[in-house]
Image (cartoon, rainbow, N blue to C red):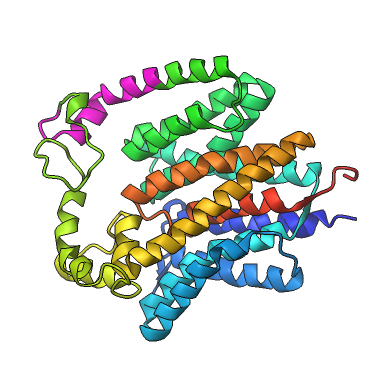
Amino acid sequence: MINVSNVTSYYKWLFVGLFVVYVPSILPFIPYTIAGLNMTGWSWTVLLLVSIYYWIKNPVNKFPVYYWIPWVLYLAVWLFFDMSYLGIQLTLQYLLPLVVGVVASGFVYNKRIFNLIFKYLLILTAAISFLFVSEFLSLGLRQPHWAATVIFLTVPASLVLGVFYLSKDFKYLILFFAMMLMPVWAMTRMAVVVFLVILVMHFANTKVVMKAVVMVMALFVGLLVVNSAAFQEKTFYKGSGDVSQLTLNYYEDNSQFNTSGRSNFYQYFEKGLRESPILGNGPRSDYAVLESSTGFKEVHNDYLSIIYNYGYFGLAMLMIGLVLTFFSVFRRMSYLRAINDGYGYLVASSVLVLFLGLLMFMYTDNIIKYNIFFMNFFFAMIGIVFAEKSYNEE
């Protein structure tokens, strides 16, 4: 007999763990920082302890954790030789999603559990999206974590789009575009691009005609966004420009393209990158550089951050884990489709396209560190792909 409450209670922790970071915007009398930790810090710390508890309670693992052993060992070795509070914090932030993935893979899922998790996820999405809307309607609620929130929204967006491709129920396509309105309103440019990539590249879309239709749709939406006043004003210093002035390289000398300050960051890291390109400068070395040079805490580029802290060797260990897991999920997706496991296939096809979104967001943000916003859900989905399913009992 499947213990439904035991499975769903863990996911409730993940959902509540994200929502609590928005509580200070709803109840402003609640301090955002408690005992030196902000709500985000408290959230991922508690979720780490909760995940360890569930792991001890149910020590079953079907997650392909062996792909991640080189990355984990490299983090541990660096921390051993360069121990610091910030280093410990960063290491645990990187490791939490793996623990979540292992815990999620140890459960047994049935239709009722899938439906409950999907229901809770949509409720969470609606609540967070309401804060977005309230900001634009001037209802008095302040929306924090704009960049991190739209990154999170790619998770439910990929799932509802997968449901559309599998069921052809257009209300899920409308729901996808409703979620896409959030990054368009906030004009988080990479998030808009990732949403369009999800629309076109979703692995549940296997029909040639449908692929052609959504490609035209994505091109149309993309052109609307690029030509919008909000995009033009945020992207070009002169307030307007054309597609030829856009660039994928945020660090090149481009007097027209507004990179929101990122183009200035690289110069502060050049010395450290030159002195230790292979092994890096140690966990959270980037923080020391930014704080002394700019006053900022994050470089908003996970590739640059990881290379500076852990070197190209560290980045290679992370990429090995991601690439091998991607192909493992791809093979699993083919198997789930062959045995007509619709729920498993939906999650597998959705998580595969999120790999692409992850790699893109890593270039413009700190998505790896934003574990409660994206990585926890992403790795939980991977865990679900490999977990046991039982559809004979409800």
Q: Residue at 46% x, 42% y: name it.
A: 356
Q: Quick check: 83 above or below 14?
A: below
Q: Quick check: 339 above or below 56?
A: above
**Magenta stretch: helix, strand or loop mostly:** helix
Q: Residue at 23% x, 62% y: name it.
A: 296
Tell me where residue 185 sits by quadrant: top left
- Report if residue 103 lies within the magenta region: no
For the magenta stretch, what is the residue range? 219-239
- Report if residue 230 lies within the magenta region: yes
Q: Position of residue 128 (x, y in %)?
A: 50, 44
Q: Position of residue 149 (x, y in %)?
A: 44, 46
Along the horizontal axis of the image, is 100 left or right of 366?
Answer: right
Specify the quadrant that holds the N terminus. bottom right
Q: Nearer the viewer, residue 11 or 241?
A: 241
Q: Position of residue 79 (x, y in %)?
A: 41, 80
Q: Residue at 41% x, 53% y: name it.
A: 367
